[in-house]
Image (spheres, helix red, strand yellow):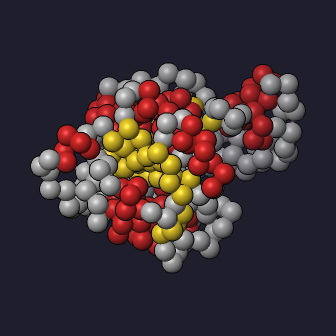
Amino acid sequence: MFNGGKNSAKMKNKIAILGCGWLGFPLAQKLKEEGYDVKGTTTSSGKLEKLEEAGIQAFLISLTEEEVKGNTTSFLTDIETLIIDIPPGLRRNPNEDFVKKMELFLSEVEKSEVKNVIYVSSTSVFEGDESIPTFVESDVPNGTSSSSQQLIAVEKLWQNHDSFTSAVIRFGGLVGGNRNPAKYLAGRENLKDPQGPINLVEQRDAVALVFQLAKQSAAGIFHGVFPDHPTREVYYSAKAKENGLVVPQFNSAEASKGKRINARATCKSLDFTFQHRP
């Protein structure tokens, strides 16, 4: 547990990011620009140089169901805020025990003097249906799939902890950078849920939102989704046309299922405005 004292000033502007990937790396760059000292991890030795060239103190750390591999002690030393942004990988490997991996890493964090933890989660903790429900930050997650249940369990791991304060940020689908939404469904046929709303966030907004959480040492549950929710058919058809791609074909024979993720409380509490339409 953090004991305060002499280390407080020393740790004030030091942040560690577990997972400097698609979101974590530009976030680390943003933090560097704002004057923070940043540590970051990768699971690939080939990416260590890229992190170091960006002024990020790089560590080779990976999580398995048996152990945390790498020098976590040095990674977490003199750190006030820890950002956890690693993909669960449950779509590719549905039998992975992501909860176990996080439990092992949590035991390492408990040995440190980290004061604030930001865990990057997903809106997939919520289940959509034909009524197209809207979910706010205070709603209890209701996802029933195995992957959703694991994400819900991991969120709970990082919440209400005696050793540190925690923020959980649930992002919708991440687009921008090298992720072009037009390519996701272009040319495909017989797609389900044409009237299901989209819940997306652009990379620059996602970075800005996590930065605000870190800057304000915010605690609680937050949502990261752009406020407009056109239907899947309208959105992906328009994006395909904009990019000169084949428009996807949706099947309207069955009722659409979906959900809307509301982020108004997040915007109000952080004085945050989404700037970039996905």
Residue at 49% over, 64% down: 70
Residue nearest the viewer, comparing 154 with 126: 154
Tell me residue 47's x, y (percent): 63, 48
Q: Is residue 52 left or right of residue 118?
A: right
Nearer to the camera, 263 or 111: 111
Q: Is residue 172 visible?
A: no
- List x then y, in percent, for residue 240: 79, 29
Image quadrant where residue 26 sits: top right
Q: Nearer the viewer, residue 254 or 82?
A: 82
- Which residue sits at x=37%, y=50%? 82
Query: In which quarter of the view is residue 52 placed?
Result: top right
Give the quadrant of the N terminus. bottom left
* Residue at the spot 19% in from the left edge and 45% down from the top edge: 8
Nearest the viewer among 60 and 276 is 60
Identify the residue at the far bottom of this view.
Answer: 66
Could you tell me which residue is drawn at 54 percent across and 35 percent down?
54
Reply above or below: 104 against 40: below
Q: Is residue 20 left or right of residue 109?
A: right
- Whole-percent x and y of residue 234? 70, 30
